Amino acid sequence: MHVLITGGSSGIGAATALAYAKTGARVTITYNTGADRAAEIVKRIEAEGGAAAAVHLDLEDHATIGPAVAQAGPVDALVANAVRWGTIMPGSIAFEDVPAAEWTAVLHANVAGNALLVQAVLPEMRRKGFGRIVLVSSGIAEEGVPGPGPYGTAKAALHGMARALAWEAGRDGILVNVAVAGLTLTDGPRHIPQDVLDRLAARTPSRRLSTAEDMAALIVFLGSAANHNVTGEIIRDGSNAGRSAHAQ
Ligand SMILES: NC(=O)c1ccc[n+]([C@@H]2O[C@H](COP(=O)([O-])OP(=O)(O)OC[C@H]3O[C@@H](n4cnc5c(N)ncnc54)[C@H](OP(=O)(O)O)[C@@H]3O)[C@@H](O)[C@H]2O)c1
């Protein structure tokens, strides 16, 4: 099994690469600015006896997508995890103040970029009659928070993309799902005060926030042969803060 994981140079993508490698899969990770961090992940996998490679991919620069996929070679699974972050802090910007350039950049990279990425891997998956695609999304796409308009909009677009693709590619043995992360304890949220993290954890069903490894386990299942026929689903990790009346 050969898996292409975008944004494998840090956070959830790096944890996913390490988790896939433990299953015996060969992984190719992509990086944008983090060539050194990506090389570290490749080294860690190789040190544990696995096979890995890193290639450059910039979702904002669509000309890099085809060459990155060509360099990776034929893949059995794609994890579209990389993200071009826009403004994501809730309440940090009024909707009407989001610059047009941010709308353009975030949608160009995260929607069009991921669509082109899927286009690039599909023909080979169809030829083989096997493929797994996991698009990584955010609870912000569904819950909506004030402020991060472009980011939430772009992530919600991935849900529509997965539903369409599941119907489109299912007959060729290709299963497509969305893995929805809630607040996940990667480097990103390190600046969030502990009392805020504790409050968010208390609003989840299992009363804890997920780690990158927790998300990786979900992604690896959806994006492997162990997933026999789950497709077109939007699957929420337990780290998503609940809206249930039971949340406290
Ligand atoms: N962490 C959370 O709390 C959380 C919550 C909800 C959803 N998510 C989603 O989970 C995924 C991973 O998040 P994370 O927290 O692990 O993020 P992260 O640590 O910030 O990693 C982001 C990855 O995306 C890559 N990247 C950034 N800009 C890119 C671009 N223009 N083109 C291609 N790659 C680019 C980065 O590469 P370089 O570092 O090499 O530049 C990095 O590998 C994202 O899709 C994110 O939206 C995360």
Image (spheres, rainbow, N blue to C red):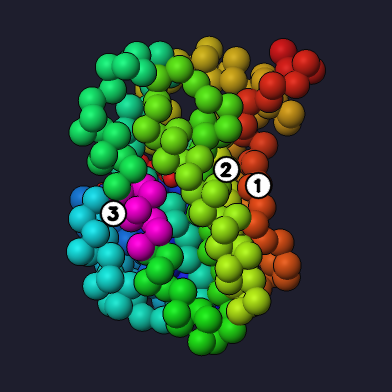
Mark number displayed over residue 59 = 3
Q: Is residue 148 magenta?
A: no
Q: Is residue 138 above or below residue 14?
A: above
Mark number displayed over residue 235 = 1
Q: Residue furthest bottom?
A: 127
What residue would you read off at disc 2? 180
Residue at the image position 52 percent from the left and 15 percent from the top = 196
Nearer to me, 23 or 118: 118
Please report whichever mark, 2 or 1, sits nearer to the chain's N-terminal start.
2
Question: Mark 1: which amino acid?
Answer: Ile
Q: Which residues are magenta?
A: 109-116
Magenta stretch secondary structure, dominant: helix
Badge 3 residue CB within 8 Å of ligand 1? yes
Which image quarter is the C terminus in?
A: top right
- Picture coordinates of residue 37, whole percent (x, y): 28, 53
| Quadrant of the displayed image that contains ligand 1 | top left
Nearer to me, 14 or 99: 99
Whole-angstrom CA distance, mark 3 to mark 2, is 20 Å
